[in-house]
Image (cartoon, rainbow, N blue to C red):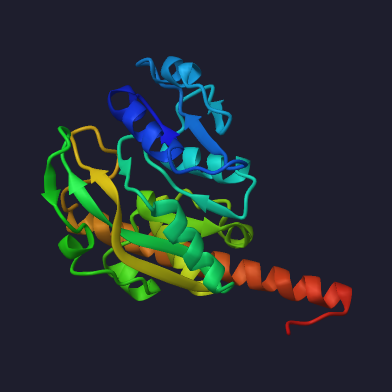
C-alpha cells in the first residue's frame, strides 16, 4: 500500500484489507513522507501483519510502489491504494485465479466507483472504460489496468523492476509486462470500491492530446527496451550454464 497524506480514508482501507488476511500474510505500507498524521495512525494499528516503511523524503507514487514490491516477500503481491475499500472475497478470488494456472502473472478485477462520502458513482469501473482489454496494444491506446484492483505473481518482478521513470504509471507498466511474459486473468466481479475524490494521484479527467501521445511513446520505448534486455539476459544465462529454454 502506497500512502501519502492519506489519513482521511486510511483507517477504513486498512481495516478492509486486514479483515481478509490470513496468518502469515503481510501488509507492507510505504509512507511517502506524509505530513498529515498518516504515519502516527499507522503506528497505532495493532496487527502482526502490518509492516511500515517510511521514506525519508517524498519520492512519488511510482517509487513508493516499487519500494513496496521489493519489500514484499510472498509469492502473490496485491497492489493497494490508501483510500479505497476491499470488498469481501477479494483475497480468496485472486489467489484462486493464480493457483489455477502457473502461467498467470497478473490478476485484475472490476471495481465499483465511489465518491469521497462513499456514495456509488458507477457500479463498474471497467464499463466506464468500455470493458476490460488487457493486450499491450489496448493498454497503449487506453489503459484499463487499475493498480489498486491488481495482484502480481512474484516471478514477474524479475522482468518488471525497476519501473522505468518514463513509464506513465506503474499499473500500465506492470499490466503490459504481465501480458508480454505470461497471462493476465480478468475477474468481472467488483472486489473493490475505488474512491474518486479531489486528492487522487491518478488523473480523473482526460489529458491533453500531446501529453497522451508522449505517454504512449514513452511506454512503447520502455516496453521494447526492457523486453529486449530481459530476453538477452536470459539468453546469456542459458549460454553460460549450458542450458536452454524448455
**226 with respect to 89 (left or right):** right
Tell me if residue 167 can be seen. no
Q: How many marks?
A: 0
Q: Position of residue 102 (x, y in %)?
A: 59, 72
- Residue 230, picture quadrant: bottom right
| Residue in front for this viewpoint, 102 or 162 | 102
For the N terminus, the image quarter is: top left
**185 with respect to 24 (left or right):** left
The residue drawn where x is 44% and y is 48% is: 79
- Residue 140, picture quadrant: bottom left
The residue drawn where x is 41% and y is 21% is: 34
- Above or below: residue 38 compared with residue 186: above
- Residue 145, picture quadrant: bottom left
**29 with respect to 172 (left or right):** right
Tell me if residue 131 can be seen. yes
The residue drawn where x is 16% and y is 53% is: 206
Q: Position of residue 141 (x, y in %)?
A: 28, 69
- Above or below: residue 115 compared with residue 138: above
For the C terminus, the image quarter is: bottom right
Q: Position of residue 197 (x, y in %)?
A: 18, 36
The residue drawn where x is 63% and y is 61% is: 155
Q: Position of residue 13 (x, y in %)?
A: 35, 35
- Above or below: residue 161 compared with residue 47: below
| Residue in front for this viewpoint, 157 or 48 | 48
Amino acid at each position: 500500500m502506497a500512502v501519502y497524506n492519506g489519513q482521511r480514508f486510511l483507517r477504513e482501507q486498512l481495516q478492509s484489507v486486514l479483515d481478509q488476511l490470513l496468518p502469515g500474510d503481510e501488509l507492507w505500507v510505504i509512507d511517502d513522507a506524509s505530513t498529515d498524521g498518516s504515519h502516527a495512525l499507522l503506528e497505532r494499528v495493532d496487527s502482526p501483519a502490518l509492516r511500515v516503511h517510511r521514506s525519508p523524503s517524498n519520492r512519488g507514487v511510482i517509487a513508493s510502489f516499487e519500494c513496496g514490491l521489493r519489500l514484499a516477500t510472498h509469492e502473490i503481491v496485491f497492489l493497494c491504494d490508501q483510500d479505497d475499500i476491499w470488498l469481501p472475497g477479494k483475497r480468496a478470488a485472486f489467489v484462486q485465479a493464480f493457483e489455477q494456472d502457473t502461467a498467470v502473472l497478473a490478476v485484475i478485477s472490476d471495481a465499483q466507483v465511489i465518491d469521497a462520502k462513499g456514495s456509488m458513482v458507477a457500479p463498474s469501473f471497467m464499463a466506464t472504460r468500455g470493458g476490460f482489454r488487457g493486450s499491450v496494444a489496448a493498454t497503449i491506446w487506453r489503459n484499463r489496468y487499475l493498480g489498486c484492483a491488481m495482484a502480481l505473481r512474484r516471478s514477474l518482478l524479475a522482468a518488471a523492476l525497476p519501473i522505468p521513470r518514463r513509464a506513465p504509471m506503474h499499473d500500465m507498466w506492470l499490466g503490459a509486462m504481465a501480458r508480454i511474459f505470461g497471462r493476465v486473468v480478468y475477474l468481472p466481479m467488483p472486489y473493490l470500491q475505488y474512491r474518486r475524490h479531489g486528492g487522487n494521484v491518478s488523473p480523473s479527467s482526460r489529458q491533453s492530446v500531446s501529453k497522451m501521445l508522449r505517454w504512449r511513446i514513452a511506454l512503447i520505448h520502455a516496453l521494447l527496451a526492457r523486453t529486449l534486455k530481459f530476453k538477452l539476459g536470459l539468453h546469456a544465462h542459458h549460454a553460460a550454464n549450458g542450458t536452454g529454454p524448455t
